[in-house]
Amino acid sequence: MAESHQPSPAFSYERAFSRNIGWLTTAEQATLRGKRVAIAGSGGVGGYHLLTLTRLGVGSFHLADFDSFDIVNFNRQAGAFVSTLGQPKVEVVARMARDINPELELKLFPQGVNQDNLGEFLDGVDVYVDGLDFFAFDARQRTYAECARRRIPTTMVAPLGMGAACLNFLPGQMTFEEFFGWGDQSELEKALRFLVGLAPAGLHRPYLVEPSALNLAERRGPSTDMACHLCAGVAATQALKMMLGRGKVLAAPHGTHYDAYRDKMVHTWRPGGNRHPLQWLMLQLGRRKYAKLLAEQL
């Protein structure tokens, strides 16, 4: 579903984003105006990704989400308000983004990302930004595989505790599948490999004060608004560097993890991804821990 609106008479792109100039050149700002970003997921991190990139001056987006806002989203999601309860997330955040830039070109995918619309979702896209739910295994696996095939750069920044863990996948370099090794594994194994691969340093683990809040059987876990905001800042910066070709982009098997609660930042390097000996050991320990936790929850 494509949408376009006539710009407001009071709106001026140049004036609206003029305070970006200095960190961006005028030519770079004009370049961002012509870029198209795909964001799958419009909830926790996805909504903030959209609003941050919109304020950066990116001119076009493909947005996908099949869900509607619920009261349990209030603690962290950009579009979650009493006034938006029950409304489709993708439509709500699209309205919010257009309230920033009425000239935006938006293409909405209210069925989310699936096998039938993935090609259209990625058509003409310069960067893919991952805002999918942690447990969206099939959609995530298909999307990254298609991005690798189309040579679309991607950035994934996960909200963990009160911090953000970043992994980028660039054309011609290590792919999502090569790093995580999902294949046709079970959902529980994919969840474990995803969690361990996202944040090998595990900066968030020491202050998880209620472990039972992580319920794999019910596909839910604890979250914070601070982490979502941090993720949006990191993801937009990575996307900016990819779109402008300026600044070094660390790509998998390199990753970064910043935790605001512990005031720590780490740069991780795991050649082979989850096949790395340290990752293998963490996976073994994780299987024991989460098998016990899952048995208690089922």
Image (tube, grey):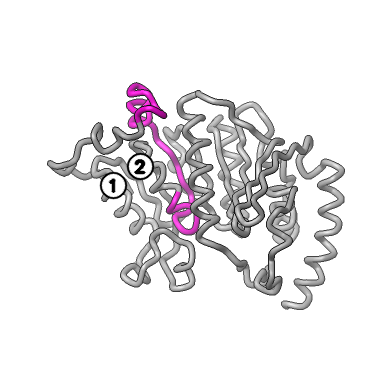
CB under 8 Å between discs 2 and 1 = yes
Measuring 45% from the left and 68% from the top, which residue is drawn there?
74
Q: Is residue 119 left or right of residue 14?
A: right
Span highlighted in magenta in the image: 21-48
Task: Compute the Cα span from label 2 to label 1.
Answer: 7 Å
N-term mark: 2 or 1:
2
Q: Residue furthest front?
A: 263
Q: Is residue 158 left or right of residue 237?
A: right
Query: Which picture quadrant has residue 11?
Result: top left
Q: Is residue 292 left or right of residue 206?
A: right
Work out whether residue 206 or residue 101 is closer to the camera in this orientation and state it: 206
- The three-letter amino acid code for the residue at tag 1 is Ile
Measuring 46% from the left and 32% from the top, which residue is drawn there?
126
Q: Which mark is residue 131?
A: none
Based on the picture, tell me whether residue 174 belongs to the magenta stretch.
no
Return the x and y of residue 82 as percentages of the image width and height.
Answer: 35, 72
Based on the picture, tell me whether residue 27 belongs to the magenta stretch.
yes
Work out whether residue 1 or residue 227 is closer to the camera in this orientation and state it: 227
Residue 125 appears in view: yes
Give the structural element (helix, strand or loop) at label 1.
Answer: helix
Give the structural element (helix, strand or loop) at label 2.
Answer: helix
Measuring 25% from the left and 32% from the top, which residue is drawn there?
14
Residue 182 appears in view: no
Return the x and y of residue 237 as percentages of the image width and height.
Answer: 50, 37
Return the x and y of residue 217 as percentages of the image width and height.
Answer: 68, 71
Q: Say above or below: 244 vs 41.
A: above
**Residue at the spot of label 1:** 100
**Residue at the spot of label 2:** 55
Return the x and y of residue 122 as percentages of the image width and height.
Answer: 46, 39
- The three-letter amino acid code for the residue at tag 2 is Arg
Q: Residue furthest left?
A: 9
